[in-house]
Image (cartoon, rainbow, N blue to C red):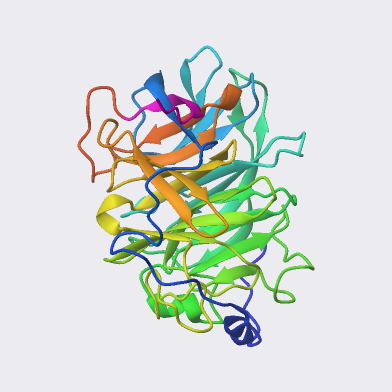
Amino acid sequence: MMLSPSLPLTIVAVILLTGCTAPPRSGTTSSPPASAPADALRPIGDPTVLATGLAAPWSIVRLGTTDSTLISERDSGTVVEREPSGQLRTVGVVPGVVHAGEGGLLGLAVDPSDSDHWLYAYLTTATDNRIVRMPLLSTSGSYRLGAVSPILTGLAKAANHDGGRIAFGPDGMLYATVGDAGQPSRAQDPASLNGKILRMTPTGAAPRDNPINGSLVYSLGHRNPQGIAWDADGQLWAAEFGQSTWDEFNRIEPGGNYGWPEIEGIGSKKGFIDPVYQWPTAEASPSGLAFVGGTFFLTALRGERLWAISPGSNAATALPFLTGSLGRLRDAVPGPDGSLWLLTNNTDGRGSAAKEDDKLVEVRLDVARTG
């Protein structure tokens, strides 16, 4: 088990490494083109329901193109298996999960290069937020959880701003989004891992090529980052909850400082990186992020919609879809055959649960058609 390391004071110098983007062109977005690029993907047709009756689900992990899918249920700490047939079964309950506020069993991840099927989980305990891993035993239809091994402990927890997304990058490293746990000063504090995006080896060590020697910190100045995804060039992007004005879509640079709590949204302040796109908080509250066929898809909780985002060399386009039709959307992952899988989140105490909520749904994607 590796305890959260203190960060060297040299992290302060990281703040000076970054530049800023141009100020927004309107009051609602950083750059509001009227339409997406011609090759941008968008949802088509009606969503297909893949599973129902989920309780406060948080994260989706697809184990393979023909294998099962795992879903975390936040409040109970349960890992649910959706079998290829569509049936649901309980894989197990992750030990030590304590739900309070936004905490509980949050992100799940598997290392795509690991044939041993370690399942990673970000969770809240009675004392902290932590990342653990456990062997995923047996096969599809009978998976069960092995013994838990903590790989990172001691992250501050709170009733909100717990972050909680974990994902393996194309470099084979494990990335984690960690919120400020309700204390904004932590995001700029060199002695705290909160308010950061972390990068670590599969066993929790700091990679040699991290921005700061011996530190897990990959970027800092975050309030409550959650959705993370990589584009076709291996560039990391992240979505972040704002406080009361702007939610953010950020291009993550190693060692970059994203400004919280000095800045919310685009501030054009020296030493901080501005978001590529921003939304009023009523339109987003972004939680999940997926990259499919050149387009990012961002799930909105409060905004109850799916945003299709196309970053460009001069501006980014973000178009809303499914507004209000599924309620709160928590997570998104690439599905089979170029589709997108979404997780609704209407049973978490903040939504209005419809019949059979919560659901896992599939959305077909295609390029925008004109004429």
Q: Residue 322 is drawn in which quadrant?
A: top left
Residue closer to the observer: 159 or 355: 355
Is residue 76 at all visible to an observer of this figure?
no
Query: With respect to residue 171, does 357 lie above or below?
Result: above
Q: Residue 351 is drawn in which quadrant?
A: top left
> Residue 88 location, x and y as percent?
46, 20
Point out the stretch of residues depicted in magenta: 358-371
In which quadrant will I find the N terminus?
bottom right
Residue closer to the observer: 157 or 16: 16
Query: With respect to residue 208, does 98 lie above or below?
Result: above
Asked whether 58 falls inside the magenta stretch, the response is: no
Query: With respect to residue 149, does 268 lie above or below?
Result: below
Residue closer to the observer: 88 or 287: 287
> Residue 167 location, x and y as percent?
60, 48
Asked whether 361 falls inside the magenta stretch, the response is: yes
Residue found 59% across the figure and 85% down from its top: 16
